[in-house]
Amino acid sequence: MVDVIMSIDQASLIESKSFWQHAYGAYTPNPPLMEDLKVDVAIVGGGFTGLNTAWQFKKDNPNARVVVLEAAIVGFGASGRNAGFSTKMFGLEPEVVLLRWGKQKMIDAHHYLKLAVAHTRSLIEQNNFQSDYQHSGLVRASYSKQQLGRMKKTYEMFQKLGIDGDMRWRSAVEFQQDFHSERFAGGIYESDTGYLNPCKQVRALKSLAESANVSVYELTPVTSVETTSSAVLVTTPHGKVTAEKLVVATNAYSRQVPGPARLRSRQYPLWTYQIVTEPLSNGQWASIGWKDRQSFGDNRQMLHYFRPTADGRIIMGGGDAITYRTEPMEEVSAPAAWRHCEDHLKWIYPQLKNVRVDYRWGGPVSVTMDSAPEISFIDGERIIYSGGCFGHGVALTHLNGRTIADLLEGKKSELTEFWIVNRKSLSMSSDTLSFLAGRVARQALKSWDWWEERSLKK
Ligand SMILES: Cc1cc2nc3c(=O)[nH]c(=O)nc-3n(C[C@H](O)[C@H](O)[C@H](O)COP(=O)(O)OP(=O)(O)OC[C@H]3O[C@@H](n4cnc5c(N)ncnc54)[C@H](O)[C@@H]3O)c2cc1C
């Protein structure tokens, strides 16, 4: 039990921030840090990255003292709010990654992500996580002729690079048979991906880390980080931590972590929003097909992502992505984005026009200037930062935890050789410019979608 009186601010950190947390029910966080500690590794951030790193490192080094310091509760950030797709998607768009990073790095990224999906799945199976994992594949769908044309080129690119092993092209007729909607113009079925319940997953990771004697402190914001020649000094409201090494696993929140200036300029948060329907009846599911219950991503610039849940609902997210300038990051509700998600679901499936939306939420993804994630040493090798996962961080962060554990141990491995590790990254030095660039890009991408979809029936 938390043995300090909780303030209103703290209570709001525990409140459900997603359907997943809401459906999970009441949660009691671990007590905050209330003493000074000396540890081998301190980790800021209790999401997938932080908890995977903590567990992997502790497993290899049972005598090491490892702490996770989480400002709110585990899974407060993107890890407890996402759509749960465990996919091989990487960075921004495949074409942009290819253009910026070239063929070999694109192929290497694909192999890392393939490993990441397998790693996440085996972690779940070996540790008997009850996180509703389904390895049911991903469908990449197009609605218009123009989108289909682009997707064909993307598919040919995957084929040329030899990274299309689990992909099959499917026509509009096949889509119609499988998904009982006339909106789809065709696209790609990809079999080697899955999805999970992110809240169950992040809480199972917390238990796993704790079972290995990692100490997880919740309601413990890190308020300063200072490096000396022999340690990293971390301050929190009621205790200080002196650590041999520090991992900053704060992804989209990294601009607000006080400390090394380089942390501020690594990435920018972009908010994406989701809705979930009430559970569909058997009759409603029969009316829409979708018998293999795959996850979906479409081929728009402002993509939508949608998937079934274990209790028979549909989650629909995306269609817009918004940058804000509130600092520290505040929860901003987005009625227009939620309305858009609901309209889009009912546009695909008029059969569901009377289905109720039960929950609406949003969360921040971490975006970099050069369209790829990074894991980097910051000011020497005592601090490791991880971020920039875009909307594709579920599988990635699980494997990144293994990679960061290797870096902490000073090991060279196949993983630490992956090119996002200590890559040269472009910095976003000006907040105003990053914010404005986000707004301009959003408008341009929305216009692109309008153009490609102008002939579609509304
Ligand atoms: C709405 C949404 C949908 C998404 N859908 C998908 C998807 O389907 N598939 C996919 O692959 N990816 C998806 N993503 C992205 C994915 O969720 C993230 O890439 C991933 O969860 C990042 O994990 P993380 O541990 O690095 O960061 P987070 O989970 O964000 O964890 C960072 C933690 O740091 C804490 N923190 C911040 N500052 C401090 C501080 N000063 N002191 C202490 N703690 C601090 C925060 O409270 C937070 O808990 C989605 C993201 C969002 C927002």
Image (tube, helix red, strand yellow):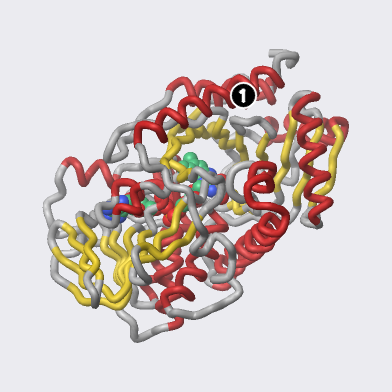
Image: 420 above or below 318: below
Residue 27 visible within the image? no
- Mark 1 secondary-structure assignment: helix
Q: Nearer the viewer, residue 21 or 362?
A: 362
Residue 408 visible within the image? yes
Image: 9 above or below 263: above
Q: Which image quarter holds the N terminus?
A: bottom left
Quadrant of the rendered image containing residue 269? top left
Residue at 26%, 73% (x, y): give it. Answer: 243
Q: Nearer the viewer, residue 402 or 159?
A: 159
Q: Residue furthest bottom?
A: 63
Dot 1 beta carbon under 8 Å from ligand 1:
no
Q: Position of residue 357 (x, y in %)?
A: 51, 27
Q: Position of residue 436 (x, y in %)?
A: 42, 28
Q: Nearer the viewer, residue 346 or 148?
A: 148
Q: Which residue is mark 1?
A: 344
Residue at 35%, 36% (x, y): give it. Answer: 431
Residue at 75%, 29% (x, y): give it. Answer: 147
